[in-house]
Amino acid sequence: GGTTRENSGTDAGGAQASGAANPDAPIKEGLKIAFLPKQVNNPYFTTADNGGKEAVTEVKGEFKEVGPSEASASSQVSYINTLSQQGMDVIVTSANDPNAICGALNQAKAAGAKIVTFDSDTKPECRQIFVNQVTAQGIAENQVKLISEQIGGEGEIAILSATANATNQNAWIELMKQELKKPEYSKIKLVTVAYGNDDDQKSFQETQGLLQSYPNLKGIISPTTVGVAAAARYLSGSQYKGKVKLTGLGTPNQMREYVKDGTVDAFALWSPADLGYLAAYAGAALASGQITGAEGDKFKAGKLGEFTVGKDGVVVLGPPTVFDKNNIDQFQF
Amino acid sequence: MAGLRGALGSWDAAIVAGLAVVVLLASVSVPNFATGRNAQFLLLDLVPLALLALPMTLIVITGEIDLSVASMVGLGSTLMGQMWLSSGLSLELICVLVVLSGALLGAVNGVFVTGFGLPSLAVTIGTLALYRGLSFVVLGDQAVADFPADWTDAVVQPIPGTSIPVMVVPVLLLALVFGVVLHATPVGRALYAMGNNGEAATFAGVSVARTKFWLFVASGAVCGLVGVFWTLRYASARGDNATGLELTVVTAVLLGGVSIFGGRGGLLGVVAGVLLLGVLRNALQLADVDANALTIVTGTLLIASVVLPHAVADVRARLHRRRQRAQLTAS
Amino acid sequence: MSLTDTGVTERIANTSPPDAGRPRRRLTERLLAVRELSLLLALGALILVTMLHNDRFLSSQSIKDLLLGCAILVILAVGQTLVIITRNVDLSVGSILGLVAFATGELFLAAPGTPWPAALLLGVALGAVCGAVNGGLIAVAKVPALVITLGTLYAFRGIDYYWAAGQQINAADMPRSFLRLGNQTLLGVPVLFLVALVVVAAAGFYLHSYRSGRELYAIGSEPAAARLSGVPVGRRVFAVFVASGALAGLAGVLYAARFGTLDAAAGTGLELQVVAAAVVGGVAIFGGSGSVFGAALGAVLLTTIGSSLAVLRIDPFWQQAVVGALILAAIGLDRLLAARMAARLRGRSARGA
Amino acid sequence: MSPDARGTKAPPLLVLDDIRKSFGAVAALRGVHLELHPGEAHALVGENGAGKSTLVKILAGAHAPDSGRMTLDGHPLLLRGPADARSAGIAVIYQEPTLFPDLTVAENIFMGRQPLRSFRRIDTREMNRAAERLFDRLGVRIDPSRPARGLSIADQQLVEIAKALSFDARILVMDEPTAALSGVEVERLFGVARSLCERGAAVLFISHRFDEVFDLCQRLTVLRDGAWVSSDRTADLTVDEVVRRMVGRDVASLYPKQDAPLRDTLLEVRGLSRAGVFSDVSFSVRGGEIVALAGLVGAGRSEVARAIFGIDRHDAGEVRVAGRVLPAGSPRKAIAAGMALVPEDRRQQGLVMELSVERNATLARRRALSRLGLLSGGAERAEARQWTTRLQVKTSRLAAPVATLSGGNQQKVVLAKWLATRPRILIIDEPTRGIDVGTKSEVHRLLSELAGEGLAILMISSELPEVLGMADRVLVMHEGRLVRELSRDEADETSVMFAATGQGATA
Ligand SMILES: Nc1ncnc2c1ncn2[C@@H]1O[C@H](COP(=O)(O)OP(=O)(O)OP(=O)(O)O)[C@@H](O)[C@H]1O
Ligand SMILES: Nc1ncnc2c1ncn2[C@@H]1O[C@H](COP(=O)(O)OP(=O)(O)OP(=O)(O)O)[C@@H](O)[C@H]1O
Ligand SMILES: [Mg+2]
Ligand SMILES: [Mg+2]
């Protein structure tokens, strides 16, 4: 008898929280905290990691950022291996694949490192804390609300996502579909989900395709920074400018131009710098024994105040900020 | 002096020497490099590259190229995921089927190249896109991850009592097979002959088309194998697995002294080239060198590997001429 | 010796048949024309099918989008064609484009007042320098281009990464006049496309009508013979790489103008698309034949496929597979046409008798 | 021969003095002197590897001499590349054709010198017309606008000649231009060369065919092992004398075939056809017999040989080896059945230039030499040494790439490769093309000996003396058909030429 699907044992189950947390333990000095983003050449992660660096400096630790130049799980694995070789106290990472880097993370954990994920999670049992920018529910509510306001509560909308297998994107899209079932959105119809692969040109083409395929399209939600910028650029140079509404998750710097020229009314994002900052503090708290990652643990994150660890070791940064004409100039990232 | 010149004359020897120097330097100057654990990580990371480089070496020696290898690995991986997800077959059987489908994909390349007589560079750029596209078609946006832990653990285990991963054993065995075929059999002789001059090889009774066809099949089968390994090692079957690996494979093969025009090179050099690439990356990573600098190093290494021998030969020829002229004027 | 010059000719007149009328048509040229025609047909069919599905596909907005979308790839394909004709290949174009695009952004950051023509020139110059590095290594060290440009593909991209260090340059950092270049139209045709047209026409004319242009074909057809015929092979190959680099530089500047958002990853993976465009356009991968018109059509076809699939709402997962299948079909067609031509040459005996 | 009338007294046009050139350890030229006079054709002869082609390449600017002086019209001549040689008025026809297959014939001729119209654009029409004028001068019909790909070797050579003519050169260098040409074309070429001489040009002519040398040239220089031996007026020389100077000893210039007892029929060809190439070819060859396949260049002889050996597929007919039908289209099976084919184009078909002499010599035997599927270097080397020694291949080492050998020595390696397979049937296409006189008689002796051992030999040759001297029977082809079979007694120069030019059938 071979190994078949039926008899494969699942290795789920309660993950973390060994030993007890000591909320009063001081943050240790000299902690070696490494940031491993999805990709080092991604401006979003550069900002986030800089936030992390600020926090690490505050707790008098050693900060380091390493990572692959292309967003692939396999290269992340080799970086995790290197980091565990180097005896890091904390590894803060954003996973390119929820499963692929698990083995390496577990080995690093066994070698004594604390694991924090941010932005993009792994399976819960492979890390102690996941610092979530915002709950998926929060994003879904926010995005649907924004588009509904802009198109006046009725009409066809489409979603322009990143890659077809981006975990967080798919979770958000699923929840947006749930959200749209609410009575107040009953006149809004989601016609399709397109994928721009987080590639500028592809997103641009997909936007163009959406507008041609759906002549009655009223709005587009693009919950990805690359997609929303490309879609905005397409709209701003086309006859649809101002007529087809666009919202999504974007950085103020990229979108400033299009908010000012009237292509985009409002969009949202959390602060990537705060996200990195919080993740670094969570890591420091773990390594100092203040928390273990169990539900209910509390820790202080510098200027951001106190946070509580939720179910499955998730810490939520907070609701996203909405940017529009009036406030966008106050943000620089 | 003579030894040095001999060594420089043979790229195989030079690259092995280069490898030794890099390992030595790294052991001395990079902390954590010379540890068993690191060796394990390093070798494990190199398994796909080493496996793919074997058939690629033979293919490049015949004057062809297979740029679709990484896409075949990706498609193999998603096929494995899809079968595991929905077929109910045993994993053993699935692995065999994946290797066979790899061979089939390679056969498609082979038919286009040898049957229709099309240039392999163009054909495999086509199948590079085709197979990658199909691997997204197979699994779409899903990733299949729930492979049994005993399987996913097995491929990363070290040989008991050592820090060498068990996977090194099949790699070495395959390398031995490919090495013997290339260097000590009639088929190997034929590969060199057809790489240099296909027509003359045909006149000498070599079935050029058939041989190349089987090489592409072999390449596909090895890709299927790597697909299986990749899926199990990362416990994840997804459409973008191994994206972009083809350029690294070609880099390793060229670094190993195989001529891109065919007809020249050997397997020892390629194995050394693969190791050199891996050791260098690993050491630089451990030394906290920026990933971006690493990209530059890879590129520079490749360029140096082809420019240096030429420069050496050039200098030697110039020295020789000068010496000759000196003799002429003296006599 | 009794045979005079005329005597010989007379005797020959006896042995060779009287003039049977010389075939006038240039087979090679006709073959190319057939190749380009079939591309046009494919393009037409694709547009037709898409239009039947959705008539907005031929709206002026959509045509503008199409033309805009292919301009950069067309320019790169022209450069690549020049290189491939000489039996070389330039895999570093994507990296050069990325480097130049980022440099252009940096230029505007450092000197916000730079007029865009200056930026354009600087970008082309930077591209040409990168091309000169390629060409220098290849021509001087006599090393295969595939290897060298594979190396510089990494090296140039690495420099780009290193320089950008994860930063991003946004539309707001660049002057309006420059960004308008990427979107503006002249008589309804995007300026970018006009630039591409000029590049195609100039390169096509040069290759067809100038000695040095024909020499590029000679080099690709038989490098050793070219050397013996006094063709300065090293210099020409060097020049071709400089040209390819300069065109990639031009494409980089236009990329910056069009996309407005720049990070170090711009143009990653573009090299295979560019080679694919040339191959689909009938440029023989081993040199000696092909035209920039074909390559440009190849580029247009590839971009149009991208747009059509999006409009047809075909599962995006299929897109890459379709492009791959198209490449295979294109080279298969070339093969078929070449076989036809060979058969015709054989049927008509070598001496035209 | 027209006597002293032409300017032997005029000052020399081109003088080479003490030219030396080495390739690594090989000294190809060791102090060569040469004077070319206006209006004179000058022959350069020497054994294979004597350095003739090397000297040609130096004259063409393709190689730089290590030392020595060149003067043109009394002025020092420095050639930095082929372009320099051209502008100095030196036109070269190389031993191996150097065409661009993808370009048209006219472009091949005028590459780099295309006629121009306004704005320095190429005038294609004028270029084609100019090419046609050249072909008219040569009396041949080649469509100037067709691509060079697919031209037969003879046509390629004619394009090369047209190219050289187009320069209106003051010095025309021809390195074995006639090796691929038939008698008629050779005469045309000579006609053109003579008219060039009459206009005051100088011709340097290299050939292994002495009849041609004595026909065309007024002076003759002999090289031996890269060294200059003598320069004399041809009128003062005899063939035997020249041969002695080349080889350093006396040689019989032709070695007639010894009679051998005829055995069973080994090769039988029945109704073999290939559309557009040849049709309904039937003949048989018995063991111990040498059958020659004669005909003009382009008659389709090589095509028949390729089809028999399985390189090309045939459309109809069959090939039998010792009574057994040979599967079509598989050289491997042909070899297994005991057949060997020495092809006409040694660079393209005979040899793998980058591989060593040893690897080339054993390439067709690689399976037979392996044990349990594995090859050992020792067995290969022994086998290679045996045959290269027997054929007196001149090479520094067996491990040297075959590309570094001279043309004739390369041909010997091809022979060695096929003799090493110990074939029953030997098809040999232009066996002595580009081979010097000493080796030639050696090859002839060898063929005769092999026939004596019971081999069936099918020999394709464009050299009539060779055909007449060696063949037991002569088959004559004309335009893809076997038109005549002549026994040894019937065959003579006129009967073969009659049949080959298509008059034999009616005669
Ligand atoms: N590129 C080269 N590298 C090394 N050796 C060479 C090279 N070219 C020629 N030789 C050597 O120089 C010598 C002279 O060769 P060359 O081709 O001039 O002879 P040849 O007189 O033309 O003979 P043939 O009648 O056979 O054509 C030979 O020994 C040959 O092996
Ligand atoms: N009369 C002709 N005119 C022009 N081309 C011809 C003629 N006859 C045959 N050919 C072509 O010329 C090519 C050369 O034929 P092939 O090489 O078999 O001739 P051959 O008799 O062996 O001459 P060679 O001495 O060159 O080997 C063939 O492809 C054939 O189609
Ligand atoms: Mg010669
Ligand atoms: Mg022949």
Image: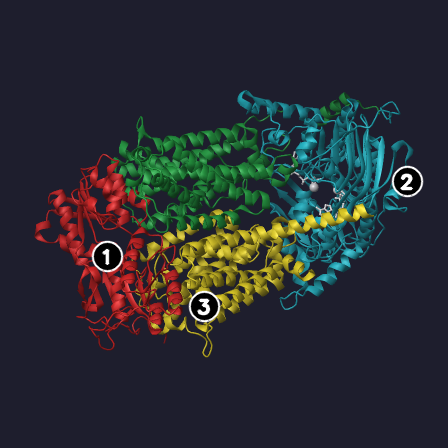
Chain letter for the green part? C
Chain letter for the cyan part? D
What chain is tagged by disc 2? Answer: D
Relative horizontal placement of residue D363, taking residue C134 as reference (left or right): right
Front residue (pair C184, C123)? C123
Q: Do discs 2 and 1 share a chain?
A: no
Front residue (pair A294, D157)? A294
Q: Which residue is mark 1?
A: A274
Q: What x and y, as percent, mark residue D362?
A: 69, 58
Q: Do discs 2 and 3 share a chain?
A: no
Q: Colour of chain A?
A: red
Tell me whether the residue at label 2 lies in contact with that at label 3, contact meaning CB atoms closer than 8 angstroms: no
> Please, is residue D253 above or below residue B154 in the view?
above
Give amino acid for label 2: Glu
What chain is tagged by disc 1? Answer: A
Name the secondary structure under disc 1: helix
Q: CA distance from mark 3 to mark 1?
A: 33 Å
Q: What x and y, as percent, mark residue D157?
A: 69, 35
Q: Which residue is mark 2?
A: D241
Chain letter for the yellow part? B
What chain is tagged by disc 3? Answer: B
Q: Which residue is mark 3?
A: B31
Name the secondary structure under disc 3: loop
Which label lies toward us, 2 or 1?
1
Q: Do discs 3 and 1 share a chain?
A: no
Name the secondary structure under disc 2: helix
Give amino acid for label 3: Pro
Q: How many marks?
A: 3
Does the numbered disc 2 mark a residue whose Cβ is under 8 Å from ligand 1?
no
